[in-house]
Amino acid sequence: MALVSLGCPKNLIDSEKMLAALAAGGCLVGAPEEAADVIVVNTCGFLGSARQEALEAIGQALDGKRRGQVRRVVVAGCLASRDGRDLFRQARGIDAVVGVNDRAAILAAVTGRGKVTRLTPYSQAAGGVPSDAGRFRLTPRHTAYLRISEGCSRRCTFCTIPAIRGPFRSKAPAAVLAEARELVADGAIELNVVGQDTTSYGRDLGGGHSLARLLRELDRLPGLRWVRLMYAYPRGVNDRLIEAIADCPRVVKYLDLPLQHIADPVLCRMGRLTSRRAIETTLQKLRRRIPGMVLRTTFIVGFPGETERQFDQLLGFVKAFRFEAAGVFEFSAEPGTAAAAMDGQVSDTVKADRARELMLAQQAIAFAANARRVGRKLEVLVDGLDDGRCVGRHCGQAPDIDSLCRLTARRPPGRFIRGTVVDWADYDLIVRPDRR
């Protein structure tokens, strides 16, 4: 059977757990789609564009079924939970649907007969966070994702995650550390810490547990070289967390901090529970306390009611602060969210124009930063080959999200090498490895 994994790293972890369950149940996993008798599509349902991508992948699998090559098509993940049984109508020919709270049912869905639906709402599911131990990993052996929480209790008016994955809950520290040790024993030297809202970690556990404390414990694990923190909610970045990032040598000086906007009226309508002043104070603390800190962020343009002046505030902020990396999304009016029903919806043309202008501004910042890196030394973790060329990442580049280091000579994947930046190509750096 084949599994198509779409969406974020958290979805990838679910895919890895489902593959492990299928393999343990006697299924032969890992076949290419064109050779598989069963195809599982693990979907994202966060944005309209993600849903469209998922439906296209499902359609391709169903084409194989109509040709007689594929016996069974199973749809799992966020889109399954979001659209439920309606998926059988949207894509006729699906054999089974498995929601995010039912990933343990994947074996029955793949090996069963007839229509199968497993869509347990969070309110009826067992509490806590399911174990991610014992995964069939899809990432390169040297890098892995470590999930520390599930769900989200922030009520951002544009977001569907709480409705799909339920409220925030932390995974027990002992379970997190056990999974981290398992991943390191399996060859991972880089762990990328993920969750819908990592900065809320531990607040629901009591006993003084926090993300800062967890990072310090991860930093002590033998064999681990890099720990990277993703999905940090701006309001949750406090002094204790900043000190932990600064103090821990294995915690890379990188933070994924989705800001979404900077104009106070837009932040208020988004339900972000923060302000421009608070955001700028946090960013200044990070840069002042941690020299060389790499900050990645995302922004939403064209949010309902966003005026030209408020967009100009965002544009000016990006130009002044000069983030190392930034992504830009056009607002998507997701059914069921408060923002979808707000007055002042912005036209698609205006949203596209604003997204392009903001990305061009960030592009100029990124290209200028790359030009300044020429001649500098970097430590690079080699990932492998990309289009026949050896590639890797320095500590300021997250896997599958940020740019790459393109090496002028091949080196084995999973190794750290030293090299000199000799050129750049768009967002990527060209690095010449030192002689061995």
Image (tube, rainbow, N blue to C red):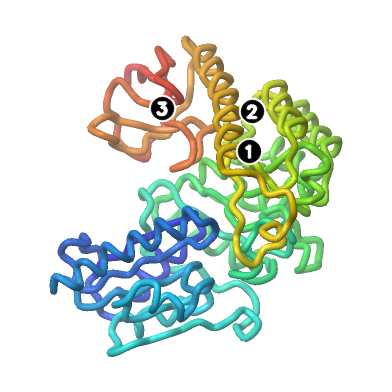
The vertical placement of 55 against 102, above or below, is above
Q: Secondary structure at mark 1?
A: strand
Using the numbered discs, state the Cα–Cα distance from disc 1 to disc 2 in whole angstroms. Answer: 8 Å
Q: Position of residue 334 (x, y in %)?
A: 60, 60
The vertical placement of 281 against 90, above or below, is above
Quarter location, residue 336: bottom right
Front residue of 214/235: it is 235
Q: Residues within 10 Å of mark 2 (few under 14, many from 20)?
A: some
Instruction: Please state which amino acid type lies under the numbered disc 3.
Output: Cys
Q: Which residue is mark 3?
A: 405
Q: Earlier in the sequence, mark 1 or mark 2?
A: 1
Q: Residue furthest right?
A: 277
Q: Position of residue 362 (x, y in %)?
A: 58, 26
Asked whether residue 67 appears in the rendered view, the answer is: yes
Q: Which residue is mark 1?
A: 297
Q: Earlier in the sequence, mark 3 or mark 2?
A: 2
